[in-house]
Amino acid sequence: MPSTSPLFHFDDRYARDLPGLYEPWRAAVVPTPSLLILNRALAAELGLDADALTTPEAVDILVGNRVVEGSTPLAMAYAGHQFGGYSPRLGDGRALLLGEIVDAQGHRRDLHLKGSGRTPFARGGDGKAAVGPMLREYVVSEAMHALGIPTTRALAVVATGEEIARDTLLPGAVLVRVAASHLRVGSFEFAAAFDAERGNLDLLRRLADHAIARHAPVAAHAAHPYLALYEHVVAAQAALVARWMLVGFVHGVMNTDNTTISGETIDYGPCAFMDRHDPATVFSSIDRQGRYAYGNQPRILQWNLARLAEALLPLFDENEERAVAAATPVLEGFGARYLAAWQSGMRAKLGLRPETAGTDDDAPDPTESELAATLVDGVPHLLATQQVDHTLFFRRLSGAARGNDAAVRSLFADPDAFDAWAPGWRALLPKTAHERLAVADAMDRVNPIYIPRNQRVEHALAAAAEGRLEPLHALLGAITQPFDERAGLEEYAEPAPAGSDPYRTFCGT
C-alpha cells in the first residue's frame, strides 16, 4: 500500500489514460542508497524542498525503494526504429516512470528513473547502471539546458552501494530524470501496431489525445486535431535539431524511440560536442556507418518524423490515400522549418541582424540579405575545410568584431582563408565602432565559451568513479554558465590536443 509523504505530490495520469502502453512494476531495491548529486535549481523549479530531498526518506522515494501516494511506478512500452531497423517491442528495459508532478509554474513533469533494475521489457541486461554514465547524462543535460536547448534534466544521481559487472566491476547508480513527458515516436509506433492487430484505433487514439492534452492543447480545437498534433511535433523537432547543429552537438543514437513528442532532447548515451568542425563526426562506437553523424542529423530527424506520420495515418483520415495527402506537406515542410531556424541562429552567432529586422523606413537591403544568406550558408564548409574548432570560432569571432583578428585567425589551418573570408563578413556588420561593440557583446551572449569538452567530461567521470566529486562540480560550475568567460577556467575552453585519438562514446546510459 503506498504511503503518504509531504515531500512529493504525485499524479499518475499516464497510468490512468494509457493502459496497454505500460507494465506496472517496482524498482529493484537499492541496498544502501546515497545521494551523489542533487540538482537544487531544478528542485526549486519543481516546487520541491531541496534540503528535504537529501534526507534518507526522500532518497528512498527517489530510487523507488518506497512508493508514495499518487505514484504508480510503471515501465513504459514503446517500439522503435534502431539504426533503421524496426523493433516492435522495446520499452523501459531498465527504467521506470514514478509518476508526474506539477512544477512551480503549473507545468506537468515526469519523474523517471534509469538504472532501476530489470523490467518485463529488459533485453538481456541486468537493468542496472554505473555511476559514470548516469553522471554523464547529468552533466550534458545541464549543459544543454544552460545553452537554452530543450532537454530532459537530471534531478539527482544516487549511488546504490552495489558493484555492477561491465568490462570490469563499476559502482552502481540510479538517475532521477525529469521531462515534459517521455512520449516518443516509438510510443506511437507501438500503439499503431497494437491497434492494427486488434482491428481498432483505441490505444492510438487515447495516446494521441493524451499527447494533445499534454503538449499541444491548441490542437484540440483545430479542424483536424491529430494533424495539428503532428504539425506541432514537426515544428518542435525542426527547431530542436537546428539548435543541436548550431552548438555542434552530436546525439549519437537518433532512433525513433529517442525522438520525443515534446521536442526535448532525450537519452544522453553516446553523445558529445564536436571539437573540430566536421560533418562526418561520429562519436558512437556502434555507429560504424555514420548514420547518426553530425551532418546527417536533420535528415535523420525528418526520417523519424516520417515514421510518426505512418503511425498516425489512421487518425488523419480513414482513407489511407487522403491521410497520406494530408501528412505529406507537413512532413515536407520540415526542411524549410529547419533551415529557417538554423539560418536565424547562424545570423545571431555571426553578429548579423535578423533577416526581418528593420522597419518600413529601415528595411533590410535585398542585396545585403542575399550576401548574408550566402555568407551563412558557406560557414560550415569554411570551418570543415580549415579544421576549425566549432565552439571557439564563433566565440572568438566577437574579438574580430571588436577589431582584433588574432585569436580567431589562429584557429585556421591556413590563416589566409580567414583573411579572404573576413571582409565579406565585416561588410555586413554595422559601420560605427560603438555599434560593432554592441554586436560583439550580443555575439558573446549566444556563442558559448564553455561546453562539456570531451576530455574534461572524461576526467570528471573518472574521478567520480573513485569517489572524488570535486572535478565534476568544477566542470558543472563552468558549463552551467556557458556564456560568461571567467578567470581560472581556461582549461574548460581548451579543445582536444592536436593529434589525439578520435573520441569514442558508448551506449552506457
Image (cartoon, helix red, strand yellow):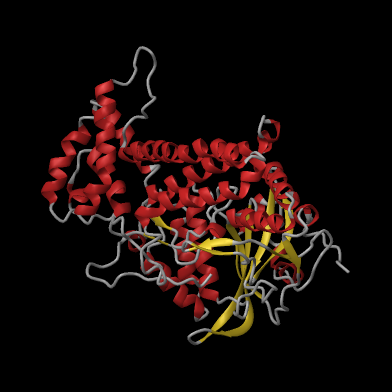
Q: In the shown orientation, is residue 400 left or right of residue 196?
A: left
Q: Residue furthest right?
A: 1
Q: Residue furthest left?
A: 416
Vertical arrangement, residue 17 with respect to residue 213, above or below: below
Q: Nearer the viewer, residue 338 or 401?
A: 338
User: How many badges with numbers are in the image?
Assistant: 0
Q: Nearer the viewer, residue 196 or 128?
A: 196
Q: Position of residue 49 (x, y in %)?
A: 71, 57
Determine the residue positioned at 56% across, 46% down.
309
Determine the residue positioned at 17% across, 41% down.
421
Vertical arrangement, residue 234 with respect to residue 276, above or below: above
Which quarter of the picture shows residue 69?
Answer: bottom right
Q: In the shown orientation, is residue 256 left or right of residue 102?
A: left
Determine the residue positioned at 57% across, 49% down.
310
- Asked whether the viewer can see residue 147, the reply is no
Q: Nearer the viewer, residue 367 or 414?
A: 367
Q: Nearer the viewer, residue 230 or 119?
A: 230
- Asked whether the viewer can see residue 59, the reply is yes
Q: Position of residue 400 (x, y in %)?
A: 22, 41
Q: In the shown orientation, is residue 502 left or right of residue 261?
A: left
The image quadrant where one finds the N terminus is bottom right
Which quarter of the picture shows residue 452?
Answer: bottom left
Q: Position of residue 232 (x, y in %)?
A: 58, 39
Determine the residue positioned at 48% across, 56% down.
143
Q: Position of residue 234 (x, y in %)?
A: 53, 42
Vertical arrangement, residue 208 with respect to residue 125, above or below: above
